[in-house]
Each structure stands twice: as structure tokens, then as C-alpha cells.
């Protein structure tokens, strides 16, 4: 049977960018014989409006069954005053939690045509293609004990960094598997010099490497030194694997190496399913952008590139993923730009659907 894909467009610009991805999915069916069983459902505010909950049990079940979930974005001012338990982002959090998506993939890829958008010098970022893997379900954001307690006559804020061997091993495996599909190189980052959890992290990553992935090149770096290297010479890296806290910071910093939020895809992966593929949720890094929603201004590339990640990591279609990424790159090289990618006024920006159509034209020519 065909691989299955659940599409959750969500709110704001979510449905607008997803419409372009649907065109591209059709293109792969028509022109490359790559058929998917696509189903579509509501999430976030859209699901709340229809069902009074940001994610129904039926949608949750479907998400557990499919090969991959592709999500647009959730949220918007209309829902800002809802009760916490039914806020749009609870839908997304429930998906991540119940699918146990512990491995968060944030690529930082710099297309030559956009190198001027980087916060760094062009020659440092041109051609950059790295992947940061952040552990997403454990670490200091979840560890117990936590809280604000009274000690004598002052308050103390407490969080606990806690990692089990198995939590480290599974995200390490995810990094090594990915490295084999890319440049075959992993750099693990922690603070083993000052943290016990860092010592364990380094040991377990090394053990998993030696036992299961000796073919992958592995190095270790203190996370603070890693932050320096990331802005000094980011092209030295291929895959970086790190914990929840350091990954939060390092992936946001890496995102700015490449420019616009409208270009950044992501994936969250969980344990391998019966078919050997990981549970997976793909989504652009950006949100629902209420300031431009409904105006045909949204850049669909982040969502298109999220689908490219699904092709590569859920559907074993690495070559087709590259074909799609190259099409996006070619469109940018032609100077086609949505408004978020324009530095000066003068030229009319491309609309969301013009950008999608331009990508299809490049696919046709590929
Ligand atoms: P945002 O990412 O939606 O927008 C930030 C800025 O970037 C805005 O000026 C927006 O117009 C621009 N932008 C974002 N994506 C773009 C695209 N594809 N093309 C062109 N311009 C783009 O973040 P913001 O404004 O902080 O949040 C808006 C809503 O989205 C909130 O309700 C927030 O909770 C939600 N949100 C949802 C996320 C998700 O679904 N994963 C992630 C982040 C925020
Ligand atoms: Mg962050």
C-alpha cells in the first residue's frame, strides 16, 4: 500500500502554505509515480472551533497510525483568551507527547541566493547545511524536583537536569541514523566538565557509537565551545546532537545563520514503528503569522521543505527530497521572493501561490 500522510493545516497561514504543499504532493504522484494516502484533519484553533478541543481523540489516533504527520501552524489572537486546557498549542503539545517525539531535527541550511540574509558574513554561511538534533522530551525542562520554594526568608527557584541512559541512547541512535543519510559525521555537545548528566551523556553517546555505529565519525564538544564554533565556522559540522536545554539555544542561534523564518523546516521523530520508520511530525518552525494571514503573503518554503524532510526521513525518498530542495533553491536563484525575503521595496513580491507554482515549474524542469 502507499505510504500514509496526515495533513493538519491548522490556523492562520497554516492552511495557506499547506495548499502549496498539496500541489507539490500531487506533482510527485503525477510526475514521479510517488503516491501517498493523504488524509486531512483539523488541529489548533480550527479544531477548537469545530469540536471544542484543539485535537480530537480521532485525530490523535490517526496521527499514531500514519507514516508521517505534516502540520502547518496553530494559534492566533482569536484564541488568546481561551482556557489553558483548550488553547491551540495544546493540540500540538498533545501530538508531541503522545507520539513520544523525543528527537527534534532543526536543519540550518543556507541557500546561496539568501546568504545576504544571514546574520553572518556570506563566506561563512554560503552552502551551509547542518542538522541540529535536540532531545525534546526530557532534561531540565521536565526533571523533578522542580518549583519555587521558600528557604529561610528568600525564595529559591529549582529545576533538575536529569537524563537516563536510555533517553540519551535513543536520541544518539536517531543522530547516528540521520548522519548515515547525510555527511556521516556527528558532534555531540554537553558540559561534561561541570555536569554529571553531561558526563553520562558523553559516555552513552560514545558507547552507542562504538557498539552500533562505528562507521560514523563522532566527536564531542563542550556546548559553550560549540556555540562559539557554530558562529565562527559552522560548516565544520554535519549533525550536532545535544540535550533539550542546549538544543533550544543552539538551534535558535543556528536558525539565524540562514535568515528568514519563512524558510525553516523541522521534524520531530520518535521510536521506530513496526515498519522500521520513526514516528514523525514535520512542521515549519514559524507560527500562524496572524499579521499576514489571509493576504497571500506567506512564504510556503518552510512547509515545502518540511515535506522534503518527510520524503527523506519517513519515506526513504532521499533523491526526491533533494530534487524538491534543489527546486526551491533554483526558484530563489531566479530572484523569485515572497515579501519576507525582500530587502528593499521596488519589485512586487511573489504571492504564496506564485511561489508554490514557481517551485512546481522548477520540478517540471528537473
Ligand atoms: P510567527 O512565526 O507566527 O510570526 C513571526 C513573524 O514572522 C511575523 O511577522 C510573521 O508575519 C513572520 N512570518 C512567520 N512565518 C512566515 C512565513 N511563512 N512567511 C512570511 N512571514 C512569516 O510567530 P508569532 O507572531 O510569535 O506567533 C503568532 C502565532 O503563532 C501565536 O498564536 C503563536 O502562539 C503561534 N505559534 C505557533 C507555532 C506552531 O504552530 N508551531 C510556533 C510559533 C508560534
Ligand atoms: Mg526556542
Image (spheres, rainbow, N blue to C red):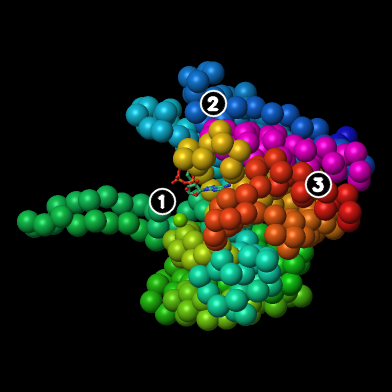
Could you say where residue 136 lies in the image, as x and y percent from the top left?
52, 53
* Residue 157 seen in render: yes
* Residue 282 seen in render: no
* Disc 3 target residue: 360
Mark 2 or mark 1: name the one nearer the start of the chain.
2
- Is residue 106 or residue 231 the one in the foreground? 231
Task: Choose top left, top right, bottom left or bottom right for residue 211.
Answer: bottom right
Marking on residue 142: 1
Could you say where residue 49 lies in the image, as x and y percent from the top left?
50, 20
Residue range (magenta): 3-32
Mark 2 or mark 3: name the one nearer the start of the chain.
2
Q: Residue at x 60, y 30 (%)?
A: 60
Q: Report, in whole angstroms, how far the alpha carbon at label 2 lies from the one at label 1.
A: 29 Å
For disc 2, the neighbor class at 10 Å (few under 14, some 14 to 19, many from 20) is many
Does 87 sit left or right of 265 as displayed? Answer: left
**Are dots 2 and 3 in contact, CB under 8 Å?**
no
- Is residue 125 or residue 293 the one in the foreground? 293
Question: What secondary structure is found at the residue carrying circle 3?
Answer: helix
Q: Report, in whole angstroms, how far the alpha carbon at label 3 lies from the one at label 1.
A: 43 Å
Q: Residue at x 62, y 34 (%)?
A: 15
Question: What secondary structure is found at the residue carrying circle 1?
Answer: loop
| Magenta run includes residue 60 | no
Quadrant (top left/top right/bottom left/bottom right) for the N terminus: top right
Q: Residue at x 65, y 27 (%)?
A: 41
Q: Nearer the viewer, mark 2 or mark 3?
A: 3
Amino acid at each position: 500500500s502507499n505510504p500514509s500522510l496526515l495533513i493538519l493545516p491548522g490556523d492562520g497561514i497554516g492552511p495557506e502554505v499547506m495548499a502549496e504543499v498539496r500541489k507539490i504532493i500531487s506533482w510527485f504522484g503525477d510526475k514521479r509515480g510517488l503516491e501517498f494516502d493523504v488524509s486531512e484533519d483539523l488541529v489548533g484553533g480550527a479544531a477548537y472551533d469545530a469540536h471544542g478541543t484543539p485535537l480530537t481523540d480521532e485525530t490523535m489516533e490517526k496521527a499514531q497510525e500514519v507514516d508521517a504527520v505534516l502540520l502547518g501552524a496553530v494559534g492566533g489572537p482569536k484564541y488568546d483568551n481561551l482556557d489553558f486546557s483548550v488553547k491551540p498549542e495544546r493540540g500540538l503539545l498533545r501530538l508531541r507527547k503522545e507520539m513520544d517525539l523525543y528527537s527534534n531535527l532543526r536543519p540550518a541550511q543556507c541557500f546561496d541566493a539568501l546568504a545576504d540574509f544571514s546574520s553572518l558574513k556570506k563566506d561563512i554561511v554560503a552552502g551551509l547545511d547542518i542538522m541540529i538534533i535536540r532531545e525534546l522530551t526530557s532534561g531540565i525542562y521536565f526533571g523533578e524536583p522542580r518549583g519555587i520554594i521558600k528557604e529561610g526568608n528568600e525564595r529559591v527557584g529549582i529545576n533538575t537536569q536529569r537524563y537516563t541512559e536510555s533517553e540519551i541512547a535513543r536520541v544518539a541512535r536517531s543522530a547516528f541514523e540521520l548522519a548515515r543519510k547525510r555527511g556521516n559525521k556527528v558532534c555531540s555537545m554537553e558540559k561534561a566538565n561541570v555536569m554529571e548528566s553531561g558526563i553520562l551523556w558523553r559516555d552513552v553517546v560514545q558507547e552507542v557509537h562504538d557498539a552500533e555505529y562505528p562507521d560514523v565519525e563522532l566527536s564531542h564538544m563542550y556546548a559553550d565551545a560549540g556555540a562559539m564554533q557554530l558562529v565562527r565556522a559552522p560548516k565544520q559540522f554535519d549533525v550536532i546532537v545535544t540535550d533539550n536545554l542546549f538544543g533550544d539555544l543552539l538551534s535558535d542561534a543556528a536558525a539565524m545563520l540562514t535568515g528568514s523564518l519563512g524558510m525553516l523546516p523541522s521534524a520531530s521523530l520518535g521510536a521506530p514503528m513496526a515498519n522500521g520508520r520513526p514516528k514523525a511530525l514535520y512542521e515549519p518552525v514559524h507560527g500562524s503569522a496572524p499579521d499576514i494571514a489571509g493576504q497571500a503573503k506567506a512564504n510556503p518554503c518552510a512547509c515545502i521543505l518540511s515535506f522534503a524532510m518527510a520524503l527523506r526521513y519517513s519515506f526513504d525518498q532521499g533523491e526526491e527530497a533533494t530534487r524538491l530542495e534543489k527546486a526551491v533553491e533554483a526558484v530563489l536563484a531566479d530572484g523569485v521572493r515572497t515579501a519576507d525575503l525582500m530587502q528593499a521595496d521596488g519589485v512586487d513580491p511573489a504571492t504564496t501561490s506564485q511561489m508554490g507554482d514557481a517551485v512546481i515549474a522548477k520540478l517540471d524542469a528537473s
